[in-house]
Each structure stands twice: as C-alpha cells, then as structure tokens.
Image: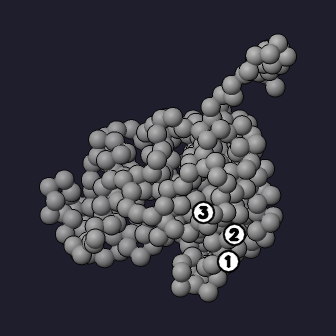
Amino acid sequence: MKPKQIFLLLMGLVLVQAGFSVAQPKLKIYLSADMEGLAGVVSGEQLGPTGFEYQRFREFMTQEVNTAIDAAFKAGATEILVSDSHGNGQNLLIEKLPKNVTVVRSWPRPLMMMQGIDATFDGVIFIGYHTGTTNPAGIRAHTMSSANLADVKLNGVSVPEAGINAAIAGHFNVPVIMISGDDAICKEASAMLGNIETATVKWAYGFHSARTLTPEAACDLIREKVTKAVQRIRDFKPYKVPAPVQLEIRFKNYRPSEVLSYLSIVERTDAHSIKFVGKDMIEVSKFCEFVLTYEPGLNP
C-alpha cells in the first residue's frame, strides 16, 4: 500500500472514531457480458434458444456475471451496470442478479454492447468475450455478426468486438480493466489494450472445440482477476481511437456493400467492402447498429 493510501486510511479511522461518518468514494463499473467466451461453450448448441444446452448455459453465464459483480463490489465498486450483450440480449437470468445492479437488455442500442456507458464510470469489465473474425484462432471467432461480416476496421486496424467496445468506452475516457474468454481473445485483447487482467477459461483447439475449465473453476479465476483489476483500477488507460474515425466493414456477400453505397455518407471500396467516416466513436457505433439492424420490414 502506498504512503498516501495509508495516510488516507488512518485519517478515515480517526474520523470514524471521532464520530464522523466517512462516505465511500464512488467507483462505477460497467460490465458487458457475451456468451461465446464462457467456460464450456464450444458450439451453437450453447448459444441460442434452439440449442439443446442453451438453458443450462444461461445459468452458467449468470453465474460468471454474478461472480464478477460480487468480486467488484467486495473490491470497492459502489455501482455496477450490466449489459446483456449476446444474441437477442435476453440471456441473463435477471431474477438471479443482485438487486443493487441495473441491466441493459435487448436491441437495438445506439452504443451496441456498451449501451449506458458514460464518463461517470471508472472501469469496464468484459465477461465471456471471443476473438475477432480475422483471427484464425479462437472459439466461435467473429465480429458483431458471424453470418454477415468478414472484417471490421477502425482507422485501418482490424478489431474484435472487445476493440470496438473498448474504443466506445475510451471515447468517455473509461478504461477496460479485465476480460474473460478463451486464450485467443485474452492474447488479442492484451496486445490491443495493454496490461489488463485476463481470465483464460478455455483453450481453443478449433472453431468448435476446446479444452475448458469447469464452470466452478472459471468462476474462481474470474473472481481473482476482477478483484485484482478493481484494486489497481488507476493503473489502466483508456483505449482511444483518434477522431475522425474511419470505419471499414467487409461483408461476406455483395449486395450489402452495393446498397449501402447508395448513401452519400458511404463509399464502396471493393465488391464486398464499404467505408464510413464518423466524427467520433458514437457516430461509428450508431452506424454499425444501423447496418446490423435495419430492414424495411421492422415492426412494431
């Protein structure tokens, strides 16, 4: 413990003994939770309502998130916002979450997997994350849409969802402090975001195979890493993408790039790719959500 921290602790004890109340400093954490990076997840059978293991893995997802929440609070967090960021955005069993958190659910959202983040937060935790679509390693590797997108770049650099979401947080000067997932995303995120805490809960053999920790062991590791991250939260730096932000999206098919190029703000750079320049990550996030969500038959 640093001398300044010791001094403040001693002063707090003196004030308490003298009858003064000492307010706990506010420490807000944003927690974004996906599913592909959970312990045990290896295929679509765990990831959506039609999968035979999905209901069980909703329980495991909720357990990993609850472990991170509990560890963060015990390490000093005073407020936590949880984003259900996988699939339909309705995966977490919210009745099993503690009553002192709030939850973001369903879509669309202007800030996608980071909806609700702002400059009042002190740190971001990613639970159950996976690597990006251009990474040859990693379980269920994709970026935003496994069915439609082949690459997403920010200012010329291919990024996974962790990179996009870290850049959104960075717009508000909020750093990512911890990530859990397979070995591929932990390596990729560390290279991009710096010395963040990483919890490797499984090791990829292929797109649909892995060696994995059990859910209980994964929770033990997540607890350890979240605790360390919150305890040294002032060590981390925001991941900032210089503005204006150039977004490049490469589709797996021809027609999306063709039709999007009809918009004057979009440039078609090749048969499969488009470029959009936003004034900041907020504009880029909104454009991404439009690309992924809009269809003429939207209702109600």
Tell me which amino acid carries mark 2.
Phe
Badge count: 3
Q: Quadrant of residue 228?
A: top right
Q: Position of residue 15 (x, y in %)?
A: 79, 15
Q: Position of residue 257 (x, y in %)?
A: 24, 68
Q: Is residue 298 visible?
A: yes
Q: Quick check: 95 left or right of 263? A: right
Question: Which is closer to the viewer, label 1 or label 3?
Answer: 3
Tell me which amino acid carries mark 1.
Arg
Q: Residues within 10 Å of mark 2 (few under 14, many from 20)?
A: many
Find numbered disc 1 in the image and state the secondary structure of the residue it sits on: helix
Measure the C-alpha gap from mark 2 to mark 3: 13 Å
The residue that disc 2 covers is 60
Q: Is residue 161 visible?
A: no
**For residue 229, above or below residue 198:** above
Q: Position of residue 278 (x, y in %)?
A: 29, 46
Tell me which amino acid carries mark 3.
Ile
Marks 2 and 3: CB-CB under 8 Å? no
The residue that disc 3 covers is 94
Q: Quadrant of residue 205?
A: bottom right
Q: Residue sitting at 28 percent across and 67 percent down? A: 294
Which one is nearer the viewer's eye here, 190 or 129?
Answer: 129
Marks 1 and 2: CB-CB under 8 Å? yes
Location of the C terminus by quadrant is: bottom left
Find numbered disc 2 in the image and state the secondary structure of the residue it sits on: helix
